[in-house]
C-alpha cells in the first residue's frame, strides 16, 4: 500500500460530503493499493461543529498544504483559493476543484496548468453529471455545432414555482430558505453562475481560451407571471438557457431566459434537473441530464477526479 496525502480547502456541504465519500469508498482505494490520508482541512472557524468523520484535522492554517500530494478545493470564491492554489500548482502538483467562478474569471492564471493536465474540474459544471469528461475526450473527434443547457438549479426551481402561480419574490425567498440560492442570489438569478459554467464548457468545444467577459448575460429577475402564463398557453416553458453557437463566423455565448417547446430536451430531460444538449456533425445530438448541485452529487465528481489522478489519467485539458 502506498500512502497519498490529501488536503481539502473548505468544509461546507460539499467538503463534508467529500470527507464522508473518501471514507465510504475505501474499498476502491484498497483495490488500487492506496491509502488516502487527509492531512488537513482548511476552514475559517476550526471550532465550528461539523458533520465529518472522526479524526479529521480542521485548521485555519494552510501550512499543511506543503505536505499534500493533491489538493481538493471546494471553498468557493476567487481570490482566496487562487492565492492558496497558485504556488501549489506551480510546484507541479495536481488540484481538484469544483470552482467554476475561479476557472471562468482567472483562466490566465490557470490555463498552463490545465494544459499540463494538473487541473481536474469535472464537478465545476453539472456537479456529478459528467459533461466535461466526454467533451474533453471522445467528443473532440466530432465537429462541434452548438450546445444549449440549463445549468442552474435555483433558476429552474424559481421558474417552476412561478408556473404554479407564485410571484418571483416569493419563489426566490423560498429557494433561499431551502438553501438552493447562492449568497448573494444574484450569482444565480442574475445568470452569472450559468455564465461561469458556459465559459468552462466553451473552452472544450469552441475556443480553449474563451473569455468569461465575452458571455452575454441576462438573468431571470424580470421574468413575469404573465410571460410564464403566455408561454404555457403556447405549450412552452421559460428556462434560463446557456447557449453556444456560431454567428457570422464567430462563437457567441449567451445566457438568457428562453421560451422553449414542452417537447424540447431541456424541458423534458431537464424538468427538475440540469440538462445539456450537445450537437456535433459526426456525433449527432447528445443529451446529458442529472443532478447539477448538492453536496454528495458534487463530492462524487470530485472523488471521481481523485481516482482518475490516482490511476494516472491527466486532468481536463482544454482545446489547444
Image (cartoon, rainbow, N blue to C red):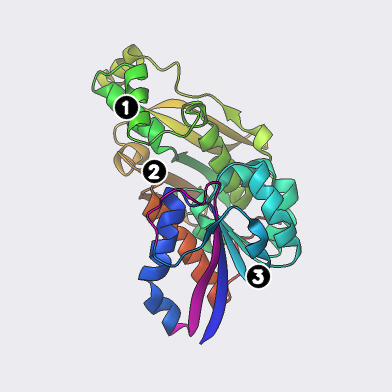
In the rendered image, residue 241, in percent from the top left (x then y), is placed at: 46, 33
Q: Residue furthest front?
A: 47
The residue nearer to you, when weighing 295 against 117, is 295
Question: Dot 2: what SS?
Answer: strand
Tell me the quarter of the image containing the C terminus. bottom right
- Residue 171, placed above or below residue 314: above
> Residue drawn at (51%, 56%), measured in percent from left and top?
122
Residue indicated by mark 3: 67
Q: Is residue 216 left or right of residue 13?
A: right
Residue placed most toward the observer, 29 or 37: 37
Q: Using the numbered discs, state the Cα–Cα distance from disc 3 to disc 1 in whole angstroms.
A: 43 Å
Element type where label 3 sits in the image: helix
**Mark-to-mark CA distance, 3 and 2:** 37 Å
Asked whether 320 or 5 is in front, the reply is 5
| Crowd band around label 3 with a 10 angstrom C-alpha radius: few (<14), some (14–19), many (20+) | few
Over which residues does the magenta segment extend? 31-52
Instruction: Give the distance between the C-alpha atoms of the residues marked 2 and 1, in whole angstroms.
Output: 19 Å
Residue 174 marker: 1
- Vertical side of 214 occupied by 70: above or below: below
The answer, for residue 108, to whether it is visible in the render is yes
In the image, residue 103 sits, relative to residue 122, either above or below, namely above
Where does the image place residue 308, in percent across and percent down from the top left? 52, 70
User: Image point 43% across, 62% down: which residue?
Assistant: 19
Amino acid at each position: 500500500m502506498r500512502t497519498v496525502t490529501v488536503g481539502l480547502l473548505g468544509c461546507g456541504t460539499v467538503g463534508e460530503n467529500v470527507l464522508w465519500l473518501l471514507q465510504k469508498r475505501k474499498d476502491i482505494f484498497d483495490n488500487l493499493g492506496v491509502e488516502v490520508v487527509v492531512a488537513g482541512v482548511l476552514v475559517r472557524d476550526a471550532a465550528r461543529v461539523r458533520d465529518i468523520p472522526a479524526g479529521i484535522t480542521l485548521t485555519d492554517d494552510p501550512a499543511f498544504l506543503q505536505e499534500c500530494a493533491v489538493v481538493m478545493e471546494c471553498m468557493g470564491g476567487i481570490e482566496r483559493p487562487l492565492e492558496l492554489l497558485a504556488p501549489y500548482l506551480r510546484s507541479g502538483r495536481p488540484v481538484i476543484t469544483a470552482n467554476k467562478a475561479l476557472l471562468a474569471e482567472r483562466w490566465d492564471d490557470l490555463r498552463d496548468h490545465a494544459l499540463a493536465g494538473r487541473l481536474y474540474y469535472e464537478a465545476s459544471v453539472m456537479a456529478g453529471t459528467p459533461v466535461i469528461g466526454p467533451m474533453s475526450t471522445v467528443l473532440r473527434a466530432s465537429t462541434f455545432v452548438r450546445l444549449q443547457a440549463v445549468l442552474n438549479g435555483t433558476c429552474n426551481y424559481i421558474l417552476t414555482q412561478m408556473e404554479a402561480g407564485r410571484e418571483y419574490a416569493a419563489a426566490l425567498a423560498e429557494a433561499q430558505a431551502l438553501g438552493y440560492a447562492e449568497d448573494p442570489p444574484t450569482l444565480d438569478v442574475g445568470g452569472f453562475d450559468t455564465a461561469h459554467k458556459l465559459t468552462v464548457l466553451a473552452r472544450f468545444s469552441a475556443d480553449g481560451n474563451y473569455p468569461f467577459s465575452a458571455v452575454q448575460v441576462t438573468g431571470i429577475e424580470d421574468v413575469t407571471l404573465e410571460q410564464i402564463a403566455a408561454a404555457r398557453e403556447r405549450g412552452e416553458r421559460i428556462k434560463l438557457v446557456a447557449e453556444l453557437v456560431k454567428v457570422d463566423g464567430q462563437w457567441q455565448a449567451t445566457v438568457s431566459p428562453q421560451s422553449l417547446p414542452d417537447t424540447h430536451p431541456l424541458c423534458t430531460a431537464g424538468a427538475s434537473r440540469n440538462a445539456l444538449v450537445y450537437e456535433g456533425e459526426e456525433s449527432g445530438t447528445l443529451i446529458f441530464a442529472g443532478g447539477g448541485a448538492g453536496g454528495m452529487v458534487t463530492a462524487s465528481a470530485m472523488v471521481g477526479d481523485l481516482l482518475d489522478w490516482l490511476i494516472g489519467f491527466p486532468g481536463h485539458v482544454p482545446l489547444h
